[in-house]
Amino acid sequence: MRLIKQLQNYPSLRPAYRAWWERRYGVRPNDVFLVSYPRSGNTWVRFMLLQARPGFQEEDLQRIREIIPDMHGKKPWFECQRTNVVKSHLTHWQPFRNVIYLVRDGRPATFSNWKYQQAEGVYDGSFEEFLTHDHWPSSWNQHVAGWTQARETKLVVRYEDLIRDTPKHLKQMLGLIGWPTSEQRIEEIVQNSTKENMRRLEQSEGIALHRVGQGISSWQEIFDQHLSKQFDAHLGDETRRFLEKPTTF
């Protein structure tokens, strides 16, 4: 991470660093990195993409971490028997060549990330401290501003738009990844990928999906006028537009 921060001051070195990084980790020209701020729907999207991959079998659901690996998982992603899709929460200026960026309204995303990090024992501060202090991987505003303006980002998908018209946006992602899928199959995948079905698989099949749908309904209760103003103070025009209903304080 320190190297990445240093390299940002020397943009002319970026091509050489990317070439080294791709050789070192076996990255291929058609690899696509599915990037998002944590708790922004990345798990749901991976679950749908897995079912759309060529040659999918039901037992593949048990191997989701291997087939579409998480850069932050226990097993190094570059050692996995993977497809050409990799999940990441890292911030901008990574040497990724092709990025699909999934962006969710920063208020529920930040609140859900705080709840998740608390449950995992990673962060023990208050939500107000989480909004105003540095935390992994960065603030929502920094994350979104970096990736949505990066030339490596080939497609930006709003989580809220994905909910409203899942088949349309899933088809767009599959087109970029290069996995041709019929309209009928896409509809089947959407039906198979409800929160209820994913939770059932978590509980009955032991498939690790990181507490699907947890901690997302109560964000409005904690975002009072004071916290909303604090959150808004760090937003720029390029990120404010991704709020589902911008605040008006």
Image (cartoon, rainbow, N blue to C red):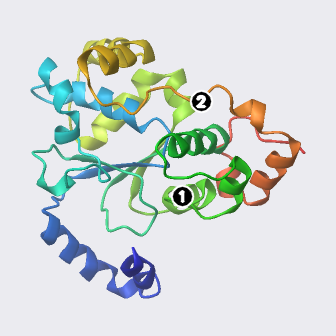
User: Is residue 241 shown above or below 55?
Assistant: below
Determine whether, in the image, residue 86 is placed left or right of residue 114: left
Nearer the observer, 124 or 196: 124
Give the quadrant of the N terminus.
bottom left
Nearer the observer, 221 or 33: 221
Q: What is the spatial separation of the Cα atoms under label 2 and label 1, in whole angstroms? A: 19 Å
User: Which of disc 1 and disc 2 is earlier in sequence?
Assistant: 1
Q: Which residue is mark 1?
A: 143
Measuring 20% from the left and 25% from the top, which residue is drawn there? 61
Q: Which residue is mark 2?
A: 216
Determine whether, in the image, residue 134 is placed left or right of residue 166: right
Nearer the observer, 90 or 206: 206
Determine whether, in the image, residue 66 is placed left or right of residue 145: left
Measuring 15% from the left and 26% from the top, which residue is drawn there? 60
The three-letter amino acid code for the residue at tag 2 is: Ile
Measuring 54% from the left and 22% from the top, which residue is drawn there? 164
Mark yes or no: residue 233 visible.
Answer: yes
User: Is residue 248 shown above or below 213?
Assistant: below
Give the quadrant of the C terminus.
top right
Residue 70 placement (x, y as % from top left) = 29, 47
Snapshot quadrant of residue 134: bottom right
The three-letter amino acid code for the residue at tag 1 is: His
